[in-house]
Image: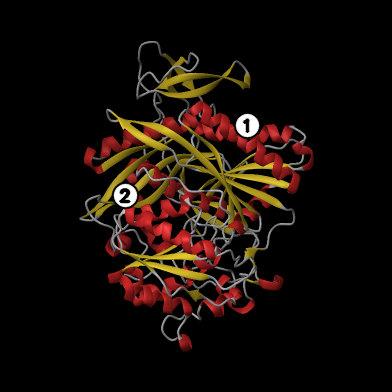
Amino acid sequence: MNDDYQIHLNFLPVIGELPSFGIFRKAREGSDRRPDEDSASYSFASGNDRDVRASYWVRTSPADGYEKYVARADENNNLTRYALHHALLKSVKAVLHEDQYVVRDRGFLNEIHLVMKHHPEGEEHLVIQPYHLRELGQFGCLVDFQFRKNDEFPFSRRIQQLSLSLDRQFKRNLDCYIDRLEKIRAFVKERAGIFTGLRLPGSATPFSLSKEFAPLPARRLRSKSYIFGNGRESRSQFSGLRDHGPLLPLKAAPSLLFLFREQDRVAARTLAMALKGTKGKERYSFPGFGSLFKTELHIDGDPIILPDLSEASMAAALVKVQAKRANMPGMLPVMVLPEGDDNGYLAHKADFAHAGIPTQVCTLRVIQDEYALKWAIANIALQIFCKAGGQPWKVRPTTEPTLIVGISQSHKTKYVEGKKSIEKYFAFSVMTDNSGLFQRIQVLGEGGSKSEYLRQLRANLQAVLAEGSEQFARVVVHTSFKLKFDEIDAIQETVSEAARRGDGQRCRFAVVKVNQKCRFFGVNRHVNSLVPYEGTAVKLGHHEHLVWFEGIFPDKTTVSKAFPGPTHLQFMRISDGAGISDDDLLQDIINLSGANWRGFNAKSAPVSVFYCHLVADLVHDFHDNGLPLPQVQVIRPWFL
């Protein structure tokens, strides 16, 4: 890789220096509640010591009890970002009508959505988010394209086209990076007046934003390499599995027990034939389960016929499955269901997962569409293989054995008089090693009160870390962006305590915040497609990075799919003394993005976080529908 490799980030920096600005503030008293919706809390240095800080409520307009204060731009980066948001919003209001923009509150991150184009299916937005790019020491804003779907319209190929995931011919949009850049640049040019002549609150000095993306140095981490049977490696999951066989084969041929309604018998037979493979492979371009996984597939000749899709039918089917599994413990139920929210999927998944039985579901829409089945059958077979107890591959890890602890939550919420509150707290961990091999799932906290839940979270995580430190040289916690601030604080404090105790003498610890839903976007101007190279890493600041898990290769610049954008990573330093280097943390995360057993082209995300999201979404739906919770500790990945 050339030393001049750069990524141009969707960040429009401030031209020149930001001036001081005026705000109104009053000291916070303990844990007092926010006085009003116009106030926000920020810290200020006490005297000359910048490390000793006091918290204040801040406003941009005067109010009782608030005093005027002149703040420097470098006094508190979050405060300056808050002031920049108000400057942008004031400029927007001066130029646009109120139906041409929307202000969205995303916690600490306020966004302004400029409505650029209307369609019956939804709207095209230019999203503006104030940002401080620490690596360059510059303030500015991130600008991004987003298609906002109209809630009245069902999801469709037209919506995928408007979202740039499909091209004009409704095929995979291989030019998605080019199209996204063109949309952003055209919209910024169209609304250029908003980014010029800005004024921070209480300041008479105008400033403007650049209209060009900021270039940042980039580098490539080591490419993912997959390990299969007998330790042989390949850069491709599918061809490696086909040529070398699975990492851990099944001990015996898996037995599939089909469950379906009588009217779906033909579809079930089609799925069974597709899994076994057709002679000559001419129909589905799939060599068959036996050929790919080196283990024959047995299909039980006595399927279970469902009278309907009710919860009672699913419960009755579970009893029959349990009776069959008494004689054949490894039998795997395969259910054929129609498409739709009322297709019995949740009732089936909840009942079977609660009983500790992994299942495989396939919908009629996929089975009856020969083109869809052609592309899906290999992934369905892969999921069956894993749920039956096999291990298809792992990734070549970094040198030191590492336990990766992914943590997420799925709280049950309720609404009382229109106000949302949490009725039940639930957090769990998905554990893998740094080769991506699934270890186990464990409940970390469960309860009706926040205090009891956080107590459990700390205690159970402490036990996980102590056990992990006995077996691994490093323990790294990956936190989902879904976690609340008090949960993040509890995790960070618990890991810090483990590092300070004796655990830290035999093991090193780190916490990584992984955010896939971010506003960052960047282009590689070294290639016509603008797609960054796979494994590209860009430093945003101290222990803060962007990583592209997928992309082109320097020796193969052809775009074969629509590549996703980057993932935002923040490393929270834990261990005293010799910690884990950023490079090792980055490489482990890159590797774990290739360990996904949900499919050969499954979403490229670290399995520590991706598996957490799969479990969290299911548990959330179980909570909302009053269904039993799964036996999450079951070792086989039932959630795929």
Q: Position of residue 95 (x, y in %)?
A: 26, 39
Identify residue for label 2: 125
Which secondary structure, mark 2? Answer: strand
205 vs 154, left or right, is right
**Amino acid under label 2?**
His
Q: Residue furthest bottom?
A: 280
Q: Quadrant of the N terminus?
A: bottom right
Image: 374 above or below 395: below
Q: Position of residue 48 (x, y in %)?
A: 62, 18
Number of the label disc, if any, that sits on residue 493? 1
Image: 426 above or below 119: above
Q: Position of residue 59 (x, y in %)?
A: 39, 22
Label 2 close to label 1 by CB (< 8 Å): no
**Amino acid under label 1?**
Glu
185 vs 383, left or right, is left
80 vs 59, left or right, is right
- In this rendered view, identify the residue nearer to me: 470 or 49: 470
Q: Residue furthest top?
A: 65
Which secondary structure, mark 1? Answer: helix
